[in-house]
Amino acid sequence: MPRILDVGCGPKKYPGSIGIDMNPDTAADVLCHLDQGSLPFRDSVFDEVRAVHLIEHVDNVIRTIEEFHRVARPGGIIFLVTPHYTDFSSFCDPTHRWHLNSFSFWYFYPEGLHGEASWYSCARLKQRRLRVRLLQVWRYLGFEFLVNHSLRFRRFWEFYLCYVVRGKVMEFELEVLK
């Protein structure tokens, strides 16, 4: 059985996972406030770390990803779900601190965001899968398919079209490199 950590599990913990949350009125197995210290687990113990609609709430995205990287085993998966910054939900929730796009985690890729590795973090990730969901009308018109199947089109969309052809939510599956 894979060891799965569901960070910020809320009332619906991922089946078979160890759930952590800061709120005692959740399905959490472990109470922990991620912004106030480290996760209470040893290094490299989880096959998968899941953070569904959590990363946009944390104080420090880089430190949080580094902590996920620390507790995940080499080759493990970090699964993130977050709103695209052009979605209404990104800005209507007053607890959202970050508004991210489909390139936000390139910071942790070996080639980095601007063609060279980041010198501010040692955490390295490799994108295994990214799914960008668009508003329904754009999905039916084929834009979602293009955004998800062509890096070139996705870059064009992020730079020039995303305020018209708005994103909804992004799902990242990132492989831990150690």
Image (tube, rainbow, N blue to C red):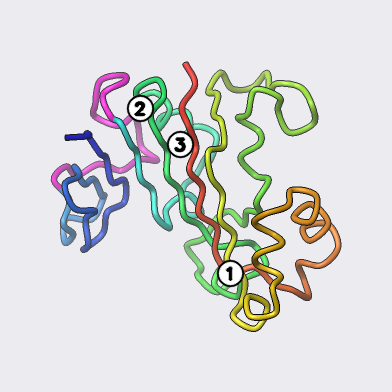
Q: Residue 99 location in percent, x, y? A: 62, 57
Disc 3 marks a residue whose amino acid type is Thr
Disc 1 marks a residue whose amino acid type is Lys
Q: Residue 119 location in percent, x, y? A: 68, 18
Which residues make up the magenta segment?
29-46
Disc 2 marks a residue whose amino acid type is Ala
Q: Between label 1 and label 3, give the one nearer the viewer.
A: 1
Is label 3 in a helix, a strand or a loop? helix
Callout count: 3
State which tag comes first along the sequence, 1 or 2: 2
Q: Between label 2 and label 3, give the one nearer the viewer.
A: 2
Front in this rendered view, residue 150 or 104? 150
Q: Residue at x 55, y 58 (%)?
A: 170
The Cα atoms of the two marked residues, 1 and 3, are separated by 23 Å
The Cα atoms of the two marked residues, 2 and 3, are separated by 12 Å
State which tag comes first along the sequence, 2 or 3: 3
State which tag comes first along the sequence, 1 or 3: 3
Is label 2 in a helix, a strand or a loop? strand
User: Does the magenta-highlighted stretch encompass residue 33?
Assistant: yes
Q: Residue 106 location in percent, x, y? A: 66, 36
Residue 168 bears which disc, if any?
Answer: 1
Q: Residue at x 25, y 41 (%)?
A: 32
Provide the residue designation for mark 2: 72
Residue 104 bears which disc, if any?
Answer: none
Provide the residue designation for mark 3: 64
What is the quadrant of the N terminus in the image?
Answer: top left
Residue 35, relative to residue 10: is it above or below? above
